[in-house]
Amino acid sequence: MNEQALFSPIYLASASPRRHELLTQMGIPHEVLRIPSPPGEDEPRLAGETPVDYVRRTAREKAERAVAWVRSQGLKDLPILCADTTVALDGDVLGKPADLADAAAMLRRLSGRAHHVYSALVLADAQGMREALSRTEVSFKTLSEEEIAWYCASREPLGKAGAYGIQGKAALFVAHLSGSHSGVVGLPLYETYQLLTLPAGR
Ligand SMILES: Cc1cn([C@H]2C[C@H](O)[C@@H](COP(=O)(O)OP(=O)(O)OP(=O)(O)O)O2)c(=O)[nH]c1=O
């Protein structure tokens, strides 16, 4: 048996290098779509929208843009995978930090307590859109100002929801995790596998 027997090729509509790496590690054949979008801006949250509603809507909107892009470019018709990852604390959504001062403020909020990371997936294919959601609880140790300054100096917080990357130096701060490690990184692999292998017509 080879990997091609498990998976058909897909498009990954994401600028996140982590998502590309995770699919590659799993041997899932894919082509990354580079869709022009407003750089680095987080999608605004709607009034009254919960973090879960927000992450699911954002992933759906990415999928809608990707479907339109594939059509407009006349690309071949393959299923398109999109994802969105959001850090939630006290009902707030912690998006990508605007700068290192913003990152330090987010890390101070995460210090010494648990938060949730939601990763929403959308697979768009000829049958429409299928969705999955992963929810992970992450507990951070209490962070000293020295640790926050050290971590910010690495510049790792930039471009990452909640101002940290569990795949990098922030792993030193994670006292406990319950859920999906790959979901925190940005692409929950179990849920991805479920979406990709659902029988036709599900
Ligand atoms: C919490 C956490 C987030 N992240 C990253 C994953 C995502 O890249 C980013 C959240 O932003 P997203 O908006 O989910 O993704 P993106 O803008 O990087 O890429 P695209 O919209 O094109 O798919 O935060 C980590 O890499 N590690 C972590 O531990």
Image: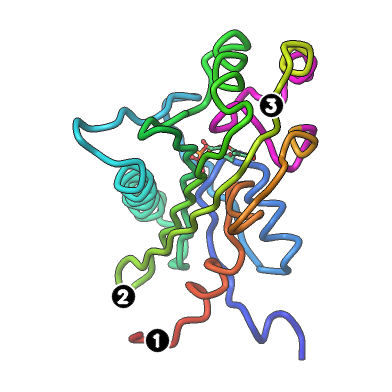
* Secondary structure beneath label 1: loop
Mark 3–mark 2 distance (CA, rounded to whole Å): 47 Å
**Image vertical order of residue 149 relative to residue 51, above or below:** above
Name the residue beneath numbered marker 1.
Answer: 200
Quarter containing the C terminus: bottom left
Q: On the image, numbered disc 2 is attached to which residue?
A: 127
* Quarter where residue 140 is shown: top right
Compared with 177, 152 (above or below) is above
As drawn, 8 above or below 80: below
Q: Identify the residue at horizontal 52%, vertical 80% (top origin).
A: 197
Which residue is found at the position 45% from the left and 37% from the top? 88
- Marks counted in the figure total 3
Mark 3: amino acid: Thr
Q: Which residue is mark 3?
A: 142
Of the two numbered discs 3 and 2 in the rendering, the one whose residue sits closer to the viewer: 3
Ligand 1 shown in quarter = top right
Q: Earlier in the sequence, mark 1 or mark 2?
A: 2
Would you say the magenta stretch is mainly helix, strand or loop?
loop
Q: Label 2, secondary structure: give it.
A: loop
Judged from this view, the residue extending furthest toward the bottom is 1
- Pick whichever of labels 1 and 3 is earlier in the sequence: 3
Q: Position of residue 14 (x, y in %)?
A: 53, 45
Q: Residue at x 40, y 50 (%)?
A: 66
